Image (cartoon, rainbow, N blue to C red):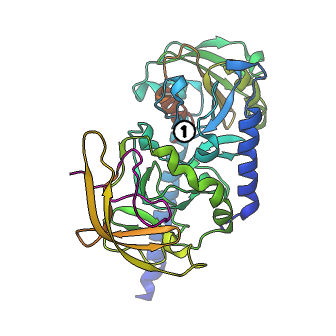
Amino acid sequence: MHKLLPIVSILLFAACDKADSTASAAATKSTPANAAGLIERWREAGLQVSAFDPADGDKYGGGECKAGQVNGVDAVICLYASPEAATEAQAAGLAAVGPATGASLVVGKQLLVIADRRASDPEGRTINQATRIFRGR
Amino acid sequence: MLYPGSMRTRLSIIAILLLAAFGVAGAGKEKGKSKQVRFVGGHPIPKAEGKGYCHIEAPHVHVYAPAEVKLQYRVHDGDYFFVGDPVAYGWEGEKFAYYGHHPVAVDVVLGDEGDDLEHCYLDGSHYHAYQPPTALEFELHADAYWYVGEPAPAYLEARAVLDPIDVVYEPIVYTRPAVVVASAPVGWIGVSIVVAAPVVEVVEVVEVVRPKPKKARARVGFEVVVPSLTIELGVRGGYHDHGHYERKHKKHKPKKHRGHGHDDDD
């Protein structure tokens, strides 16, 4: 029996290691790494996503930004050099929302600014779905 | 430890009052409708703004202020966090039944790190869109969560101010969870918080609810009346709450704490 212990330990270690890798992969998958990944995830979730074109990053703290619409709700996705830079840009994003229902959220180096300027999402279902995907939830 | 103490609750109440008075929970500096008000989590939409329920879970802004802010909201990291029953406002997502007062681990609900603990002061059966965290002592009994842990000092201190939340729900007609039990779980907060006045009076009650224009209702039962708690032993030998929360009705019985009635609609 004792001779089997090392083998059992190795198998258990391998199993745990694999489980960790799977969990890590799932975490990575759950949070889109870039604008293209996020847009793809939105489409997969059944959201109607327009083309996302380059936008003025100065308005969003100097990020590399793309703007478009999700189910008729305006969205801007920006990428920054660091998570700190993205966090610093969050207030600018909120200001850009203006007099509308919206959000300015940061995940890693990305900023999502979403604003329902045409009141097409009165109960916030689209914004909730889009932001949940962005936040990996 | 999930009891951050009473200071946080005091600050939350003060923040609510300040925000309600000055409307400073916003990033926008514009006046009137353009002022941003910060929320986190789902919440009712005021009638003037179209009513219904906002489903946005992440921190977000609107250009309106919350209604019944003092009773229905707490301030969490500068955002309004709704602590009431979402089903009353049209929430159709996942929901979980609770019975009586209980703590709300706000950070757990929001998926954040932190230990912000607020309290729900809704009497009787009601819903929330979240389950209680395992770190708090809840018991699942008759398909509802009952808080059986020690009442936090902050809960007791803020009770006088926040307990009247039920008044907000009196005019709202919606179906509350049906909770039928023979007895409350041991340690339920609804019993444990009355230790300062451990007098239990058992009275037989024959109650006739004042008839409404189109229907009359009557009930017969036994009630265990203690300060701040009503346990009604109904005709089926257990106390229960059918969840049909009706408009207010006058009760002809000894003065006691507000509780959900035994509303048998005949």
Q: Is residue B3 above or below residue B214?
A: below
Dominant secondary structure of the magenta stretch? loop
Please provide percent x and percent y for residue B241. 34, 59
Q: Is residue B255 left or right of residue B103?
A: left
The answer to whether any part of residue B248 appears in the image is yes
Q: Residue at x 76, y 41 (%)?
A: B18
Snapshot quadrant of residue B254: bottom left
Q: Amino acid at mark 1?
A: Glu
Residue closest to the eye, B240 or B33: B240
Q: Answer whether residue A95 is magenta in the image.
A: no
The chain that hosts pointer 1 is B
Residue occupied by mark 1: B57
Snapshot quadrant of residue B153: bottom right
Please provide percent x and percent y for residue B28. 75, 24
From this viewpoint, which residue is outermost toward the left?
Answer: B266
Please provide percent x and percent y for residue B64. 63, 26
Q: Is residue A118 above or below residue B133?
A: above
Magenta residues, start to end: B245-266
Q: Is residue B153 left or right of residue B97?
A: right
Q: Is residue A54 left or right of residue B133?
A: right
The answer to whether any part of residue B139 appears in the image is no
Q: Answer whether residue B264 is magenta in the image.
A: yes
Please provide percent x and percent y for residue B42. 53, 39
Q: Name the element at disc 1.
A: loop
Snapshot quadrant of residue A95: top right
The image quadrant where one finds the N terminus of chain B is bottom right
